[in-house]
Amino acid sequence: MTDRVLVLNAGSSSLKLQVVRADSGVVEAQALVERLGSDDATFRVTVGDRTADGRVDSAGHAQTPAVATALGILRDQLAHLGFDLDGEPPVAIGHRVVHGGRDLTRPVRIDDRVIAQIASVSALAPLHNPANVAGIRAAIEEFPGTPQVAVFDTGFFADLPETAATYAIDRQVAADAGIQRYGFHGTSNEFVSAQAARFLGRDLAELRQIVLHLGNGASASAIAGGRPVDTSMGMTPLEGLVMGTRAGDLDPGILLQLARTGDYDVDALDHLISRRSGLLGLTGRSDMRDVCAAAESGDEAALLALDVVGHRLRKYVGAYAAVLGGLDVLTFTAGVGENSAPVRSRAVAGLEFLGIRLDSARNECAERGARRISTDDSAVTVLVVPTNEELAIARHTLAVVGQD
């Protein structure tokens, strides 16, 4: 059986595609459509050192769903660059699905029942699950007969301890509504925590780790012996750290107050805390690179935002070190975590009492790949480890198909 897997990540306004060899991790092709559904939609396709990019002519596909249009365009562009998915088709297609609810906790072969289950928990991830379902349906239409597998962001956290997963509200209300901590970025956390152990030449089972997955969405996770014991995102991806447009931790009384005294219904509140908060709400900028640039120029709002981000990160690192009963490894990953030295330095400032000592030169180094950024005498090893969710999804997908 070939190990070529097509990995799809369908978002609310984007579609990412990668063709990867699950065994070796070699990426044969990758593609992206951004601003899906708008007149400004663009694509970029890369095969080796060859690249094609351009605009998506949505007018020519007026009767076709945006995700299906995007997938068809990417397939055509891959063929244009000499990469024909029909000539050597993937053994399977792996889909990133954000929320699996209580029932879908492991990678699973997709059928009509699974699609219905994913759709049924869309209220728990309204920005993600409907797009994930659209991507699945488009892939089934585009690649009939090819096995399709769903890999869930929530899966890694399915066996969180009850003490971490339980919210202190009426038990029957919680049971009826499916209210519990599910956690997200699970595929990334599983991959990165294992890579950190491999980098250090240590047994994963002996390590107490905190993984900071910092991108437009951001989370902190406490991992003991390779299994999660707590995580900052909750029933939805809104809880926890400050994010690009999401508020993170918020007193629920704020929402009640806005509902009682302001012009905010449920949809308006959702838009406020999902789309207009976080870095965007604090600075008018949602990209951490723009916020850091503004801070360097003396912008007070940007400086405050970075301090708020750092404060929140330090709170979680300290709390999770307590939950773990000590800390061996602190790892930064994802776009911001891998590339923003200012965010990393703020995240650990003042945490020397935990045994964390950052090496400034190592932290500022723009080197790619897994690397140590703590001092040699730091009791806690601080790492930067690039995540690779596509490879993790490909390997889970191949494992499911191999069981059929």
Image (spheres, rainbow, N blue to C red):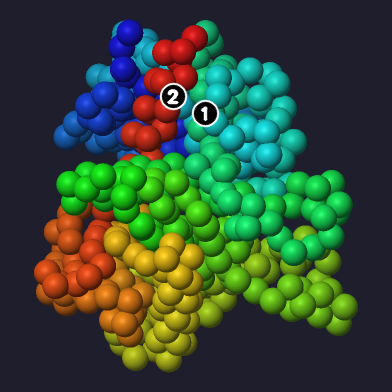
**Image quadrant assignment for residue 103:** top right
- Front-most of residues 19 and 252: 252
Q: Which residue appears at 63% of the width and 58% of the height?
A: 163
- Left or right of 286? Residue 78 is left
Q: Which residue appears at 52% of the width and 58% of the height?
A: 231
Q: Where in the figure is residue 117, as x and y percent of width and height?
A: 71, 30
Q: Which residue appears at 46% of the width and 27% of the height?
A: 94
Q: Where in the figure is residue 77, as x and y percent of width and height?
A: 35, 26
State how many labels appear.
2
160 in relation to 294, above or below: above
* Amino acid type, residue under disc 1 in the picture: Pro
- Left or right of 390? Residue 240 is right
Residue 363 appearing in the image: no
272 in relation to 127, above or below: below
Q: Which residue is mark 1?
A: 107
Q: Where in the figure is residue 120, as x and y percent of width and height?
A: 74, 36
CA distance for labels 2 and 1: 7 Å
Residue 3 appearing in the image: yes
- Front-most of residues 215 and 208: 208
- Left or right of 79? Residue 131 is right
Q: What label sits on residue 188 in the rendered view?
A: none
* Amino acid type, residue under disc 2 in the picture: Thr
Q: Which residue is mark 2?
A: 397
Contact between marks 2 and 1 (CB within 8 A): the answer is yes
Q: Where in the figure is residue 200, as x and y percent of width and height?
A: 18, 51
Number of residues whose C-alpha sits closer than 10 Å to that of mark 2, classed few (under 14), some (14–19) or many (20 or more): many
120 in relation to 263, above or below: above
Q: Which residue appears at 71% of the width and 60% of the height?
A: 167
Number of residues whose C-alpha sits closer than 10 Å to that of mark 1, classed few (under 14), some (14–19) or many (20 or more): many
373 in relation to 173, above or below: below
- Secondary structure under tag 1 reads loop
